[in-house]
Image (cartoon, helix red, strand yellow):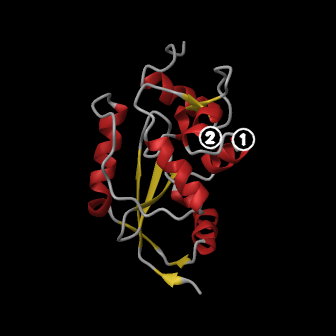
Amino acid sequence: MATQAQLFFNEMDSPLGTLTIVATERGVRHIHFGHLETSTAALKAKLRKQGITGEFVKCEDTLNNVCTQLKDYFNGERVEFDVPLDLCGTPFQQKVWEALRSIQYGETRSYKQVAEVIGAPKAVRAIGGANNQNPVPILIPCHRVIGSNGAMVGYGGGLDKKEILLSLEGAIEKIS
């Protein structure tokens, strides 16, 4: 049975293009690359799978803090976030996302290293799957996970966005 919730959203410009931030009263639930109007059906479907229904209500006030923190991050003035999150995931996904939050700004880890951190050294592919399901990219820095050989692999928003984020953090050479 689905829970009716108020779904607040705001859009902001970023070096990655438009970001749509969606939150409930409990915290940030999703960050989506692109405008809400192009992804409303997909976002509603994801939320429905999580047992949440409701209408999106534009609310700059509710999301002002997260937008400010993201702007500060993109301007090189913030290295970590302290906004409330309202995450929904399996216990395994939650464990992976918590491990991702421990990867410091400007650093990277391989999928294998993340698997070892959570005590599941053979779960490298499952780590990739949990990364892919991260509902709040940037806030939970899944972009900091790279291939064992240092290659840029897998990013839900596209490898170009992953490279921009890692370049911004100084984790890789500036992109020409």
Q: In terms of secondary structure, where does tag 1 sit?
A: loop
Instruction: Please name the amino acid that badge 2 sits on.
Output: Ala
Q: Are marks 1 and 2 in contact (CB under 8 Å)?
A: yes
Residue 135: % across, % down:
54, 55
Which of the 4 image quadrants contains residue 142?
A: top right
Which of the 4 image quadrants contains residue 74?
A: top left
Residue 34 visible from this viewpoint: no
Instruction: Please name the amino acid that badge 1 sits on.
Output: Lys
Q: Residue at x 32, y 30 (%)?
A: 75
In the displayed structure, 67 sits above or below 6; it is above
Q: Residue at x 60, y 74 (%)?
A: 48
In the displayed structure, 32 sits above or below 53; it is above
Which of the 4 image quadrants contains residue 42?
A: bottom right
Q: Is residue 72 left or right of residue 99?
A: left
Q: In terms of secondary structure, where does tag 2 sit?
A: helix
Q: Which mark is residue 122?
A: 1
